[in-house]
Each structure stands twice: as structure tokens, then as C-alpha cells.
């Protein structure tokens, strides 16, 4: 009991001394031990990393789940260490409504058939969105949370300890300074000076040890950046895959609707009209091959002058052929196109009068039209 009371009194005394030292520093009445410039830079970089990681984490959560109520629900499930229940995506819900509407309005009618086709496409889009959210959560959000809830809490704890050690050190310096000033007036303070010098040596040792521990943790932020860089690449890969899947699903749907519309309204075709806005691939020709494939316009699927293209009569030009790396899998729509597999190398060239969104591709003894946006042209 006496030991506990003494310990509480000692802790209270240390806390009071630190509070006095901190207050005097704020009012400029006490000297403060400054950290070296490199250490201050490490502290600033750590704070910046923490702040931006929090912002990126929160905004990514909004991107993946725009509904704030759903985000709160998922947060509570995570804190309770329980599995988050599966939630229907907006695309899947829309697909369900369209399918039910087609069933009630008449699945054999032109409108009902179209509703069914669009519902199937929306269902596939919803499944792709679900896969993207799952991949992004595991490969990107989880590592960011682990940093904030693990490494950063450890860094913060050691920084608080370092701050306390610094306050103790500066308090010891102040006591030694006062003891020496008193010694100059009287010879009765020799013991007080020796005691103050001993306390200062102990405080300096503890401060140096804690500074080294904190420095090592702060330097570990570089490893955190490397880890977050890898996670960022995985997030971009997941997002690229998602948008590529969406593009393929919508392109297939557009083809289906185009053929069915031609049968319902003779003389018209959905792909003959110009889009309301230019294709994304036209915004930056220099970077089109390095971005998510935004394919040619619907009119490019059967460009004028190429409908009667005889592949067996096509020969590569004497000059102008190039090698290209395939960025994404591509399924040929008809016999005039060449199916592609991601990462394979093919030879490509253009013919006079061809749609600029397409090239002729050759692989072995096979040839056919290929979309430019699925390729990375090599020099």
C-alpha cells in the first residue's frame, strides 16, 4: 500500500514537472531542446503520410460505396468483427426490375425482349462492380487501414514518449542551471549540483534512446510508401479490369440492340448515328493505347468501304507494318475480325480508306481487323 502511494505521488510529481516545463516553453520562459533538421523532416513526412492516407481512404470508401448509411453499417460490422452481409448492387437491382417488367409486359414483345437483354447486361455490370469493390477493399483499403490502425498508432505512442523524455531533459537542464546559480552565491549547494548533474545524465540517456527508437519508426515510413505504391497499382489494375468488363458488356449489348432495332425499324441502325460526345479514345491519341480500352464508335464496326473486305486478298504494305502488344482480350465479332489475347504480340498495319479506329492484325497465318484501343503500338 505504501509502495503504491509513493508511486502515485512520484507519477504526479513527474506529470506536474512536465506541465510546468511545457507551459514555460509556450510562454518563452524556458529553453527547449530542438531536434535536428533530419528528424524534423521525418516527422513532417510522417504527418503528411498519415493525413493523406486518411483522405485517400475516406474518398475511396465513398467511391466504392456512395451510400453513407451503408458505409456506417459496414464500419459497425468491421468494428464488431462480423462479416458484412452481401448487398445487391444498383446494377443488379436495376436488372431485377427490368426482368420483372419484361415478364409482366410481355417477354415476347419487342419492348419485353429489349428489357430482357438490357437486364442481362446490367446484371453482368453489377457482378463486375461487386468484383471490383471486393478487390479494391482487400488490396487497397485494408492496407491503408492497417497502417492507420497499426503502424501509425505505434509511431504516435513513441512520439508521445519522446515528447515526455524531452520535457524531462529540459526540466533537468533548468534545475541544474538554477543549482549552479545558487552555488555561485553559497557553498552549501554542492550536493544539489551533483544531484542535478546526475539527473541530467540519466534524462539525456533516456531521451537519446527514445529518439533513436522514434527515428527508426519514422524512417520506416519509406517502406510504408513502397507498400502503398504496390497497393495503388493493384487498385488501378482492379479498376482497369472493371471498366474493361463494363465496356465489353455494353459493346455486346449495343450490337444486340443494333441488330434487333434494324429488324424492328427497317432502314435504321443504332450504330449509324454519331455519339453525343466524341469517344474517349479520341481525347488523347498519344495515350489511347495505354488507357482502358474505349473502342471505336459503333459505325466503326462496319465502316463504309470495308464491308466487302476480302481478307485473303489483303497483303501487308512494303513499309508501314509495326509490332503491337495486346492490352486486353478481344472476342472477334465476325470472321473479318481477329480475336486477341492479352500480352500477345501481333503485326499490324493500315490500309487506304480504313476506319482510323481499326487496323489489320496478323498472327501467324491468321489476319483480321483489330481495334486500335486494345493495342500498345511498339516502336
Image (tube, grey):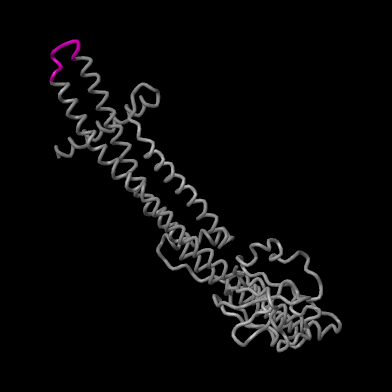
User: In terms of depth relative to the viewer, which is nearer, 171 or 376?
Assistant: 376
50 shown above or below 334: above
Task: Give the image quarter of residue 271.
Answer: bottom right
376 shown above or below 8: below
Q: Chief secondary structure of the magenta span?
A: helix
Query: In the drawing, does residue 50 fall left or right of residue 342?
Result: left
User: In terms of depth relative to the viewer, which is nearer, 23 or 57?
Assistant: 57
User: In terms of depth relative to the viewer, which is nearer, 159 or 377?
Assistant: 377
Relative image position of residue 336 (x, y in whole percent):
70, 85
173 shown above or below 339: above
Query: In the drawing, does residue 223 fall left or right of residue 208?
Result: right
Relative image position of residue 46 (x, y in whole percent):
42, 46
View extreme (top): residue: 185
Relative image position of residue 138 (x, y in whole percent):
46, 66
Q: Residue at x 40, y 64 (%)?
A: 81
Q: Is residue 314 magenta?
A: no
Q: Which residues are magenta?
A: 183-190
Relative image position of residue 156 (x, y in whole percent):
36, 45
Task: Give the image quarter of residue 213.
Answer: top left
User: In terms of depth relative to the viewer, which is nearer, 199 or 338?
Assistant: 338
The C terminus, quarter of image: bottom right
Q: Residue at x 33, y 45 (%)?
A: 157
Q: Is residue 184 magenta?
A: yes
Query: In the drawing, does residue 319 fall left or right of residue 193?
Result: right
The N terminus, quarter of image: top left
Amino acid at each position: 500500500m505504501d509502495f503504491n502511494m509513493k508511486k502515485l505521488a512520484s507519477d504526479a510529481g513527474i506529470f506536474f514537472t512536465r506541465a510546468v516545463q511545457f507551459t514555460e516553453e509556450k510562454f518563452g520562459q524556458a529553453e527547449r531542446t530542438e531536434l535536428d533538421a533530419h528528424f524534423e523532416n521525418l516527422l513532417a513526412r510522417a504527418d503528411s503520410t498519415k493525413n493523406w492516407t486518411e483522405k485517400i481512404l475516406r474518398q475511396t470508401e465513398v467511391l466504392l460505396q456512395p451510400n453513407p448509411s451503408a458505409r456506417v453499417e459496414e464500419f459497425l460490422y468491421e468494428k464488431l468483427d462480423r462479416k458484412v452481409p452481401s448487398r445487391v448492387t444498383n446494377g443488379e437491382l436495376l436488372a431485377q426490375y427490368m426482368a420483372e417488367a419484361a415478364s409482366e409486359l410481355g417477354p415476347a414483345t419487342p419492348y419485353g425482349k429489349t428489357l430482357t437483354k438490357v437486364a442481362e447486361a446490367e446484371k453482368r455490370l453489377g457482378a463486375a462492380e461487386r468484383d471490383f469493390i471486393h478487390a479494391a477493399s482487400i488490396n487497397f483499403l485494408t492496407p491503408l487501414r492497417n497502417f492507420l490502425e497499426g503502424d501509425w498508432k505505434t509511431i504516435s505512442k513513441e512520439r508521445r514518449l519522446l515528447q515526455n523524455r524531452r520535457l524531462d531533459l529540459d526540466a533537468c537542464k533548468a534545475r541544474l542551471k538554477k543549482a549552479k546559480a545558487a552555488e555561485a552565491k553559497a557553498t552549501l549547494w554542492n550536493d544539489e549540483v551533483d544531484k542535478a548533474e546526475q539527473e541530467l545524465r540519466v534524462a539525456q540517456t533516456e531521451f537519446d534512446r527514445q529518439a533513436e527508437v522514434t527515428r527508426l519508426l519514422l524512417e520506416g515510413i519509406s517502406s510504408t510508401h513502397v507498400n502503398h505504391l504496390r497497393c495503388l497499382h493493384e487498385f488501378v489494375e482492379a479498376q482497369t479490369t472493371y471498366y474493361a468488363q463494363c465496356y465489353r458488356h455494353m459493346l455486346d449489348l449495343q450490337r444486340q440492340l443494333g441488330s434487333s432495332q434494324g429488324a424492328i425499324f427497317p432502314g435504321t441502325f443504332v450504330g449509324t448515328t454519331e455519339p453525343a460526345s466524341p469517344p474517349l479514345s479520341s481525347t488523347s491519341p498519344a495515350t489511347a493505347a495505354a488507357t482502358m480500352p474505349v473502342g471505336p464508335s459503333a459505325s466503326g464496326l462496319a465502316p463504309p468501304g470495308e464491308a466487302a473486305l476480302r481478307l485473303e486478298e489483303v497483303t501487308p504494305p512494303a513499309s508501314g507494318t509495326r509490332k503491337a502488344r495486346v492490352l486486353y482480350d478481344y472476342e472477334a465479332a465476325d470472321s473479318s475480325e481477329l480475336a486477341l489475347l492479352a500480352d500477345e504480340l501481333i503485326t499490324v498495319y493500315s490500309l487506304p480508306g480504313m476506319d482510323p479506329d481499326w487496323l489489320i492484325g496478323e498472327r501467324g497465318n491468321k489476319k483480321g481487323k483489330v481495334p486500335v484501343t486494345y493495342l500498345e503500338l511498339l516502336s
